[in-house]
Image: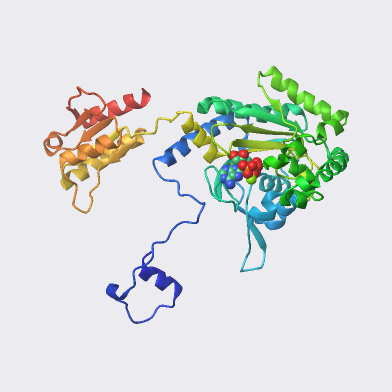
Amino acid sequence: MTAENSAAATSAPTATTTSRAQTPAATALRGVKGMNDLLPPDSARWEWFEDRVRSLMRRYGYLFVRTPIVEPTPLFVRGLGEVTDIVEKEMYSFTDSMNGDALTLRPEGTAGVVRAAVEHSMLYDGGKRLFYIGPMFRHERPQRGRYRQFHQVGVEALGFSGPDVDAEVILMCRTLWRELGLGEVRLDINCLGQSAERKAHREALVRHLESGLDLLDAEALRRLHSNPLRILDTKNTAMQPLVESAPRLMDFLGEASLKHFDGLRRLLDAAGQPYRVNHRLVRGMDYYNLSVFEWVTDQLGAQGTICGGGRYDGLTELIGGKPAPGIGWGMGIERVLDLMQQCGNSPELPAPDVYAVIPDEAAMAAAVPVVEALRAAGLAVWVHAAGAAGLGSMKSQFKKADASGAHHALIFGAQELARGEVGLKPLREATAVQTSRTMTEVLTWANELRRA
Ligand code: ATP
Ligand code: MG
């Protein structure tokens, strides 16, 4: 927006016109800190990644859903729990100035998908396997792998209670890592049991933590009685001995929880997927029960968790629906793509099949129907277009054709056109020569190329 435009947008229009010379130079506007633009050529890597994800989802039977990026604030406060990092300090919450509604930019995907499933009675005829891709918003300190707008792929399998689906959602990640060419990504799993079991453990845990009260940092002290389980995943090294010697939740689990966990372990073993039982893996959200898991890498520094998830059998009831089991994960796309680059895997980015060289304006009328026919036949065709200084020389057009990565140049030269032909030149062969083709021959060539 120019200074004049922005002035016009914020003040009522007046009859007097301001000359450019009098307008003070506008300060350049910048995007919001921690929220990034995705631009070519990076955007092509994202599209490639999303294509791989969609292919994965199709093979596992997960169907696409898109929920709004804004939800009523109580959905997250109730769903995630009040004493969580997200609800305490990371949410972009605001009041709708039109009607006073309390709204929040979604910090994660599960609550919205489960809300939608409940609202639209999606589970009336059995379980549903769903996935989403989209932006999430958390007010965190921006750094590598941690942004204020970031993007997640997530799955939610709703209405299935057995460990078979737990194993399925975990193993589909492994398939994706393989297809993305990622190096070693470790799997951590744990079992959080049910709330009655966590309550018994919690009393023992609080007693233990109170025995080392002087070691607890401010955050741990605050959580000691509201959410002591979260103290277990502290990154504070001074507290490590205390949390490592803490009573284990696993020792408080009843038969049904242990059986579920064993079931998951047996399926992972059967699939040849190694894992570590991490007793301190408790995950950030209150809604989790039974199986929780994280996929972790050492190659990304501090932000090493690329995917995390778990079972949340109580969530539908928390947000006012009928009871229904659920399990899902969220994957940070920025971190996964960063890891892919670390592993030296860069996908081949799409280049056009054809770059159309237009020596002079008069040739355009002949070129348009041809390039349209080639596109209809399925080829990607980039047409040279005039800049401020006109179309430019043949030499500069061929330079552009080369830089585009196009496999062939189609040259609409006056001499060829006079004969009803066009020039065709392969661009990726050192010894290639330009040949002339009739329009019919070009179309046949295009169809063959398409089939190849
Ligand atoms: P962390 O411990 O790194 O803060 P988290 O437990 O808050 O992660 P989840 O809520 O489980 O993260 O989200 C799932 C995934 O989304 C994470 O494993 C990570 O890959 C990604 N993620 C979470 N927060 C961010 C962020 N601020 N920027 C980029 N990616 C993120
Ligand atoms: Mg976090």
Could one spot residue 319 in this view of the protein? Answer: no
For the N terminus, the quadrant is bottom left
340 or 108: nearer the viewer: 340
Query: Is 8 placed above or below 138 here?
Result: below
Could one spot residue 334 in this view of the protein? Answer: yes
Q: Residue at x 44, y 78 (%)?
A: 12
Q: Is residue 158 left or right of residue 451?
A: right
Residue 403: where, in percent of width, then height?
28, 37
Q: How many marks?
A: 0
Q: Residue at x 57, y 30 (%)?
A: 56
Residue 244: where, in percent of width, then height?
76, 34
Display coloring: rainbow
Q: Is residue 96 left or right of residue 281?
A: left
Query: Is 164 placed above or below 90 here?
Result: above
Q: Residue at x 51, y 51 (%)?
A: 35
- Ligand 2 sits in which quadrant? top right
Q: Is residue 406 left or right of residue 190?
A: left
Residue 70: where, in percent of width, then height?
62, 55
For the C terminus, the quadrant is top left
Q: Residue at x 78, y 27 (%)?
A: 261
Query: Is 203 placed above or below 62 here?
Result: below
449 or 166: nearer the viewer: 166
Q: Residue furthest front?
A: 214
